[in-house]
Image (spheres, rainbow, N blue to C red):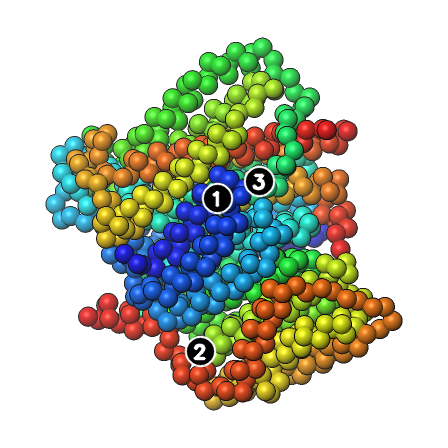
Amino acid sequence: MKKLLAFVLTIGLGLLIIFALDANTTFDDFGFANLAERVSTRYITKGSNVDIIFGQTLEPESGPANIVTSIVVDYRSFDTLGEVTVLFISALGVALLLGSAGAQKRMELNFKPNFMLRVGSRALFGIIIMTGVYVTLHGHLTPGGGFPGGAMIASAMLLLYLADDEFRARIKGFKILESIAGSLYVIIGLLGLVVATYFLQNFLPNGTVGDLLSSGIVPIIYILIGLKVGSEISGMIDNFLTEEEAQ
Amino acid sequence: MMSAILLIAIPLLAAFLSILSKKIAPVLLLLVGAANIILLWFVPSGIVIIGDFEMPFGISLFLDSYARIALYLVNGLFFIVTILNVVEYKKLSSILLVALAALNGLLLTGDLFNLFVFLEVAGIAAYLISTTNKKPLATFNYLVIGTVGSILYLFGLMILYGMFGTLNMMDMIHEIQTASIAYSSLILPFFLMFMGLGIEAKLLPFNAWVKGILKHSNTLSGPMIASVYAAAISLMFGRLINNLFMFEGKLLLVVTVLLALGVVLGEAMAFSSKKAREILLFSSISQACITVLLFVNGIIIWAVYVVIANALSKLVLYLIINRATKETKSDDVNDLQGLFAKNIFVGIAFTVAALSVMGLPLFAGFVIKFNYLTQLAVAGQMAIVALILVASLVEGIYFVKLLIKLWYSGEKEINVKFDLPYKAVFAVVTLMIILFGLYSAPLDSLDNGIDTMQDEIGVIYNG
Amino acid sequence: MIMLDYIMLVLSILLLVIAFLAVSEKSLIKSVIFLSALSMLSVVAFVVMKAPDVALTEAVIGSGLVTALFVFTLLSIKKEESK
Amino acid sequence: MIQYAAILLMMIGLYGLLTNRNVIKIVISLNVLEIGLNIFIISIGFVYDGIAPILTSVNNSSALLFVDPLPQALVLTAIVIGVGTTALGLAIVKSIYQKYKTLEIDEVEEI
């Protein structure tokens, strides 16, 4: 009975919100978002009144051809710094809660990887790592970037954990990689402050839109984020799959 | 070169480096904590642009005297709490560094989505600090309710983005003021954001997590969550209420009733509880509601003073009670009987802090309470004035009851050893409370003008 | 109602049904599977709404790693239950 | 259409939070709430017959009609925040189980 009441109440609240949004004339209806009034016109036209042509425009205000990446790493790069901190502190928290001072060993689950899984994962491991690296490297041109790329690298590690129940990645190495990548990101930001005038400013040349080696610090930052996200999530996976060494 | 961004970037860099070796982490924590306070002295005020994209397109920080006071308070308290606990909670050094960066980010940022990100970072740091209470279910409750709070805030913010198309705080305020829209369409986003932030700021109807966390707090999580986080989040909340939220008509009524309810229920629950820490946490809930009530009625400067006075007194109260509970293994009022019989000095510090929170004359609390009550009366909110007076009466009764129990020793002897750094902190806070109580001229030197966001908008948009 | 609206209509109904199942399912394993299915459906929704970046991230993180974490937690709890 | 579904999805997540007593189910409901919010944010930026906000050799000029890129950048952040909170929640669930040997909130007598 309580469930039905709660259900009716929440769905009623939902309908109330829907009607309130409908009645709200300034709130753009679904599908008719009026971009002219929004800040995002500047991100699309990159602040220039002449057209940005893929492969021709030189030195645009913000390099990446992928406009979402130009927002995530160039226009609003401070958000992404906060974002990376969220994953950093979650990985730290998981290590604090699940990890322990003593040595760790793999948890014996009643799940023995059969032949198919072992062989299949060896074949798939290479492909997934390659896709992850490709997605990270081309973050500023095609959809993807640091977050999906790093997560793909972590899922490749996950595959290794599944394929062999004695496998343990070198956690110490992940921690060092994670720390270096994070500190380099902040150092690049501070470099922007020292060399140019603002924190996280793109002080390298932007080149032509669409080239692989274009848009200044954006690919560098996205590679650092890819490495950081990959090592953090792999560390989390290791924490979830190991337990205290029974002394 | 010396810009406000360093207050966030340096702790973040230290946090990333601190996981390399466990030995340098506590050193880095103390070093960066002190460096932040000194740095704050040299940092110029004004708008700090990030990433070379001006106002509404890139993210910018905003440092005015309001933010500067808030930063001095939060960084100072943070440094005190970390010094007292760094030896015992060495493992949490990296998390505390990230918490410092997040709290500075909360107070400085001029971008509403950035505020959401820093709310999440500070929230996750607080969940991890609360795991030191060894009560996993209370931490789980805190995590779930805190995340729901952030989601409600983001939901309200995205509706505002759908309406006005910008995420920058000043740009949004300008759009809201100049757009000719029906006020009814603003009620939904404002109320969602108010609820989201209300959960973080411990306002009554949404703070089911507070009891679980602060009831089992220790000398780190108690002062950190009840004093440092509470001060940072209520000052940030005050900034949003003063400038962004325009409470009128029905919404103002609903918000005022909610807060008034919070004050009364907070006091009632504190009155009826037997555990020392429960009394403190309910009293800090009702203080939080009073603070937000003042912000909603536009009494900015006295609300800031209430936050400062509360933060300092709660720091002392929580440190003493948690320190004593660690020795006597229980915080029931009769187990702590006669706590101050042996250490008189600590007793005086506790009494001064408690009486200041209560608002007794001769202490800073009285001056602040007297002033904001007169301002409320001038603003014609007689109902609220009466309500706060009744709340103070109830507060007086249960605090005096607690003090009598703690001063006059019962049958068993308790001697809790407070080492020197604790006593030093108590001495400083007691001195400040008495000093500002007697000589209250400097309090009047500041006025509502410390929050200069509206003038900044005027400068930018009207040329 | 153009073709796109039909797709969105079907997608919305599927989303709501699977979400309700994920929330009200008794057994934990089934609930996690429904959550993973909901994540995949949200990837389809992002693709339909022309958000490839978000679809890629949600696919890899949402249905890949989050489901894995849930399954690992359930496995370790079942192991301790049996001990 | 999807915007209404997203709001109702959030409400189903809220319903799950209110009625479930199992700790893991609460984390699942939190995820449903987050997925609903993410779809809602993306639906704010959607434009009929707009194209994905990426300049490519095919649609190469910035004068074309694009979908709003800003909500997509925000959802990227919101998804990763969701993962962080879920991982932390599950770690706390494991420590709850180690300490109280049960996943039901009512059976845990944590005073």
Neighbour tally class for label 2: few under 14, some 14-19, many 20 plus, Cα within 10 Å: many
Image position of A37 with respect to B425: above or below: above
Determine whether the residue tagged by mark 3 lies in a helix, strand or loop.
helix
Where's the C terminus of chain A, which quadrant? top right
Amino acid on which disc 2 is placed: Ile
- Mark 1 or 2: in front is 1
Image position of A13 with respect to A119: above or below: below
Q: Are marks 3 and 2 on the same chain?
A: no
Relative to B381, is A45 on the left or the right?
Answer: left
Amino acid on which disc 1 is placed: Ser
Seen from the viewer's position, the closer of residues A201 and B92 is B92
Badges 1 and 3: C-beta atoms under 8 Å apart?
Answer: no
Q: Which residue is mark 3?
A: A94
The x and y percentages for residue B451 are 37, 73
Neighbour tally class for label 3: few under 14, some 14-19, many 20 plus, Cα within 10 Å: many
Determine whether the residue tagged by mark 1 lies in a helix, strand or loop.
helix
The x and y percentages for residue A133 are 37, 26
- Mark 1 or 3: in front is 1
Relative to B438, is B37 on the left or the right?
Answer: left
Q: Which mark is residue B18?
A: 1
Q: Chain of mark 3?
A: A
Amino acid on which disc 3 is placed: Val
